[in-house]
Amino acid sequence: MGRYIVKRIGLGILSLFVLVTVTFFLTRLMPGSPFQSGNVSPDIQKAIEEEYGLDEPVLKQFAGYLRNLLGGDLGISYKKQGVRVSEVIGRAWPVTASLGVAAVCTAMVLGTLLGIWQAQTKNRWIKRGLFVGNVLGSAVPNFAVALLLLFLFGVKLKWFPVSGLMTWAHYVLPVLSLSVYPAAVTARLMSQKFQEECRKEYVIMAKARGLRWRKIVWTHVMRHAYLPVLNYMGPTAAFLLTGSFVVETIFTIPGLGREFVSSISNRDYTMIMGLTIFMGAVVILIQLVVDLICGLMNPRIRKSYEEA
């Protein structure tokens, strides 16, 4: 197990370094300059770029950025004067994280219950209805769901507020928009795996021994049926926790997604780098935790890493 953990952590660090490198050089390839503006003369723009070190060779800039990053410094925003990138992350992250946690919990609970219901029900109309619901939920993008919910429940019926994130009511529409797709995929994975596990010998033997069906499901079947769901929910949870850019923009939520979109349109290099590194680190960390849980639950996964 120790070798497996060391390999996974090493892979995570390597992934983060590649992400930092690629993002840094891509920002430098963006057309224009962070300080380019119709109100600023070329001489003043050149002086500002010299002050921020943007006139130096790219490799020298990269080395300097890495040095600061290793010291825990993400830099100062080029567009928000005197504001550190870490301050923006500290302000926007709780907003995005609260929305993401609610969406992940909703998707997992809803998807698991619907998947088990679809696998267990004998009513063919319910089974077909759940199947169609899964297909539709998997096919419609979250921004389309967000616009539909906003129009129907926010504008027409006026049941829920349509902007900001102040009370529990503000969470309803964004959380539903974000959780429809992962809930549909989770339900499909759970239904398929649940039916597959129920046909296996150990379940038949447990039934023959007279164990109650509820006990068989929660102590045996769910342990195996949940593995593909965990594998799927790892990166999905990371995506939801680091911000869904479009949904945050539609509902005017001041989270990481909106900051990221704004930083790209403003060519704010340090903000783009800081947000990307932070979101990448969260994604890698969550995937690492999920892999470790899967390795504990299934020794074959752990062994495949140790032999690689």
Image: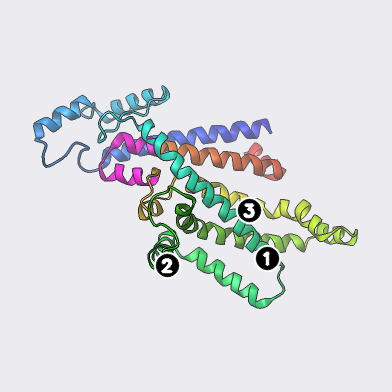
> What is the x, y in percent for residue 288?
57, 39
Kindly tell me whether residue 304 is visible in this rendering. Answer: no
Horizontal relation, residue 48 to residue 119: left or right: left
- The colouring scheme, among rainbow, by chain, secondary structure or one colour, is rainbow
Compared with 113, 19 (above or below) is: above
> What is the x, y in percent for residue 163?
38, 53
Q: CA distance from mark 1 to mark 3?
A: 18 Å
Quadrant location, the N terminus: top right
Q: CA distance from mark 2 to mark 3?
A: 38 Å
What range of the chain is rendered magenta? Answer: 257-275
| Other residues around mark 1 within 10 Å, as few (<14) / some (14–19) / many (≥20) | some
> What is the x, y in percent for residue 225?
69, 55
| Other residues around mark 3 within 10 Å, as few (<14) / some (14–19) / many (≥20) | some
Horizontal relation, residue 41 to residue 232: left or right: left
- Prevailing secondary structure of the magenta residues: helix
Name the residue beneath numbered marker 2. 157
| Other residues around mark 2 within 10 Å, as few (<14) / some (14–19) / many (≥20) | few
Amino acid at circle 2: Leu
Of the numbered discs 2 and 3, the one sitting upstream in the chain is: 2
Q: Residue at x 65, y 60 (%)?
A: 113
Kindly tell me whether residue 158 is visible in this rendering. Answer: yes
Q: Residue at x 64, y 62 (%)?
A: 115
The label shown at residue 228 is: 3
The count of marks equals 3
Of the numbered discs 1 and 3, the one sitting upstream in the chain is: 1
Determine the secondary structure under disc 3.
helix
Compared with 206, 87 (above or below) is: above
Name the residue beneath numbered marker 1. 117
Compared with 186, 165 (above or below) is: above
Which quadrant of the view contains residue 90? top left
